[in-house]
Structure formats: structure tokens, C-alpha cells
Image (cartoon, coloured by chain):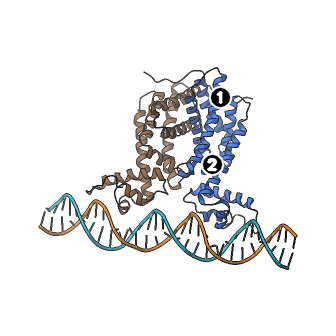
Chain colours: A blue, B brown, C orange, D cyan
DNA sequence: GCGTAACCTTACTCACGAGTAGGTAAGCTG
DNA sequence: CAGCTTACCTACTCGTGAGTAAGGTTACGC
């Protein structure tokens, strides 16, 4: 079963990454509780005490996975969005990077967003990540609003950021389940709905309930 | 600890509902694995073998919770949306009912959307529910599109439905964490973003990437 | 008022998996 | 090649919680 028999001893840093790779894979398939440290060790081509020696308890191991994948995702999106572009262009690039990341790191995505949620000790880590994402988006919207000479209400913008992040997450699931779907196409579709909606909002339009 | 000491023996149907109530509460706080059947039994004011006698194994118990809460949610939304209303009105009413349900049944929501996702045997049940929701929304959009004399592409409409459901879920989490927020306000905000966006789409507008 | 079916309990078994004790061997450093 | 550090293993302990066996008790039909 051991992926690479690894006859040779390897330096700690390398083994740690192998363990994290294996852990992400196993956690993503089984979930935190159903995954056993033995199985993770075996998938990493190593025995259980090594995992405890290097990464600590099962809980700490899971958090290490969360941190690594979370940082990767955040960096990919932030780098793609850049600094000095028009807000809609930033949003588009960020979305494209996001869906690209999900398509390329399905297991990491699954661990972060399907497992960490709900399992109490970890929900906080994820919540922070999502909050940072939503903030990023809200910031763009606020700048776009200011550029259009409008003072959008802070809580409206924040809500919109949250909603957009949620919509992106839902489509990420769609992407995971439809491997043939191009990330760019998905990004464009979401962009169509959200930006045209946000654009209308920024022009002062808004849906009104009938009397 | 027993919620209602229940000196009297109760008929099966009543006890089953009590058990499901307790199970939803405990599962929502602890998660599927961390919750013990003993704790659920105690919360229901009953002993463990009763749970096994009436609802079967822990897994079957969890599915029973999922089914009950899922049906309740779906019925609340479908009933609110009605049949013969304009699509935007249907959407608004559906969203309001949705956020209202979540605010009133936090535990049920948590079990459905935070626990069932990811835990492999249950993800399918939830996926079906979400698919039905997305279909409901997509149907509205398609009818709105047809009424506007436009032939929207099927996959675009489907994607939009998915994205909207995802956005609603994200805001549902927001509602759960901000108990003072009015469900109606949240529904209106989402409506603003999505409908204006969808409206623009239906008018043939669309965001275009710059050359 | 008595049988019997439905309700309900105490008190187990048993598997599984987190975490560890204690030891072996490989590779560097002199 | 002696000695030390680091990588690595086999083989345990021990708590926890799912699921059950076997029997007690209440209420209702007749």
C-alpha cells in the first residue's frame, strides 16, 4: 500500500510534507473522525509514531493541513487579484484563480470547506479564512462604489461580499463534481450574475418589493 | 438532566419525535461522530436501547433527522413560493421563508448543512435536497426568461440557480451567527444583488472581460 | 382482574483507534 | 571506527462508545 516504499531515510522537512499530503488526502475522503492516524501513516509510507513525533496529535495534524491549504488558497487568490486593477477586473481574476485552485486541489478544498465546517475545534480557523475572503471582496466593492461617486452602505457591501463568497463556494462544489468544466467558464458565469447585480446596485437601482 | 422527566410511558410516535428533537440538538452541537447515542438518549429523557428499538442504528438515526428537517425546509420554501406569482415575487417569498426557517430551526439547519456535508454516507441526501432547491430556482429563472421573450441558455440558468442557492446558504450562516438580524432584511439584500444581476442578464446584458 | 403486548431499564460485550514505551539502525562527525 | 543524533519501527495500553441480552413494569383489551 505504501505509495513510495522509501527505502531511504528522509529529512524531517520532506517527511512532514509527505505526511501532510497523505493527511489531506485521507481526511478529505473520510472526514476527520472516520480517518485513522494509522491509515494516514500508511498512506504516507511511514508508521504511526512518526506522525506523532513530527506533527503532534491528530487534532494538531488536522490544523496543520488546514493552515497549509488555507494559506495556499488565500495566496493564490490574492496574487491573482493584484493591486492596481479596476475592481471588476480584480474580481474576475480572483474568481478565476479561486476556481482554478479548487479544480487543482480538490482534496485540499474538501478538507477546508466540507470537513472543517461543523467540527467544532476547527470551524474557527475556517471562519477566519472566509472572513478574510469576504473582506477582500467587500473592499473591492467599496472602492468600486466610491469610484462611481456613491456612498454604499457599509453593511450592504459586507452582506454582498458574504453572499458572493458563498456563491463561489457553491460553484466550487459544482466544479469538483464536474471535472470537465473549465474554471474560467464558471468564473465568467458567476461574474455575470454578481457583477451585473452589483453594478445595478452601484447605479442606485435596486429590487423593490411590490406594495 | 432529563428534559421532561416523563413519569408516564408514552406511545411510540411521541417518543420518536422526542428522540429526533434531542438527536437534532445533540448532533448539531457535537457533530455526527462526537455525539454519543447515550447523550442523545439522555437528552430525550430515555435510555439507549429505546433509541435502537425505535430508530435503528446511529447512522439510521442521523438519516431520520436529515429527512425530517429536509422535508420541513423544503415544504416551508415551496409553500411560501406559491404557484401563480411573478417569478421575482416567488423568489422573494421563497428566500424570506428560507431565512425564516433557518432562524427558527438553527439546529436543524446546522445538522443538515454543516454536518451532513462531507460525512460520506450522508452527503448524498443533502446533495439531493440542494439539487431540488437549485432546480426550483432555475425553474423560476427560466420562466422569467421566457416571459421576457428571451431564450436563456439552459446551463447558464442552472449555474445561476446553483450560485443563488450557495449565496443563500452563506447568508444563512450569517443569520445563525447574528440572531438579531431580521430574516426579511437578509432576504431583501440577497434579492437586490441577485435579481438585479439576473434582471440584467435577462435583458441581454452581461459582464465582458476586457480585451 | 388477569393475560399479554408494548414500553422501558440495568448491565453488560467487544471492537476500534488514539496515543506511547522502548528499542533498532542509519548516517554524519570527529 | 567510536559515538551521537536523528529517523524509524513493533508492540503494546487503555478509554470510549456502538450495539445487545435479558429481564422488569405499566396499561389496555377482554
Q: Are marks 1 and 2 on the same chain?
A: no
Residue B69 is labelled as none
At x 42%, y 59%, the residue is B37
In this rendering, the answer to whether D30 lies above or below A191 is below
Q: Position of residue B131 (x, y in %)?
A: 51, 43
Q: Nearer the viewer, residue B91 or B58?
A: B58
Residue A109 is labelled as 2
At x 55%, y 52%, the residue is A121
Q: Position of residue B117 (x, y in %)?
A: 53, 49
Circle 2 SS class:
helix
Return the chain for callout 1.
B
Disc number lying in front (1 or 2): 2
Q: Position of residue A14 (x, y in %)?
A: 74, 59
Q: Nearer the viewer, residue B39 or C4?
A: B39
Q: Position of residue B40 (x, y in %)?
A: 40, 56
Give the quarter of the image for residue A130: top right
Return the chain for callout 2.
A
Give the left or right position of residue B130, taking residue B78 as reference: right
Residue A184 seen from this side: no
**In the rendered image, which residue does mark 1 sit on?**
B207
Residue neighbourhood size for the residue with mark 1, other residues' Cα within 10 Å, grouped as few (<14), some (14–19), many (≥20): many
Amino acid at each position: 500500500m505504501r505509495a513510495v516504499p522509501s527505502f531511504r531515510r528522509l529529512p524531517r522537512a520532506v517527511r512532514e510534507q509527505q505526511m501532510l499530503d497523505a493527511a489531506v488526502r485521507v481526511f478529505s475522503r473520510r472526514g476527520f473522525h472516520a480517518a485513522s492516524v494509522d491509515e494516514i501513516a500508511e498512506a504516507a509510507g511511514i508508521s504511526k509514531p512518526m506522525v506523532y513525533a513530527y506533527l503532534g496529535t491528530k487534532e494538531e495534524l488536522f490544523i496543520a493541513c488546514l493552515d497549509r491549504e488555507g494559506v495556499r488558497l488565500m495566496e493564490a487568490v490574492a496574487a491573482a487579484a493584484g493591486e492596481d486593477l479596476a475592481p471588476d477586473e480584480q474580481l474576475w481574476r480572483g474568481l478565476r484563480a479561486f476556481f482554478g485552485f479548487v479544480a487543482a486541489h480538490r482534496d485540499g478544498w474538501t478538507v477546508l470547506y466540507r470537513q472543517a465546517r461543523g467540527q467544532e475545534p476547527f470551524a474557527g480557523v475556517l471562519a477566519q479564512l472566509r472572513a478574510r475572503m469576504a473582506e477582500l471582496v467587500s473592499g473591492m466593492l467599496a472602492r468600486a462604489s466610491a469610484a462611481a461617486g456613491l456612498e454604499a452602505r457599509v453593511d450592504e457591501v459586507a452582506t454582498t461580499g458574504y453572499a458572493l463568497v458563498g456563491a463561489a463556494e457553491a460553484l466550487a462544489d459544482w466544479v469538483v463534481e464536474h471535472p470537465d468544466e473549465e474554471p474560467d467558464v464558471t468564473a465568467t458565469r458567476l461574474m455575470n450574475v454578481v457583477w451585473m447585480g452589483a453594478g445595478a446596485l452601484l447605479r442606485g437601482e435596486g429590487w423593490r418589493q411590490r406594495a
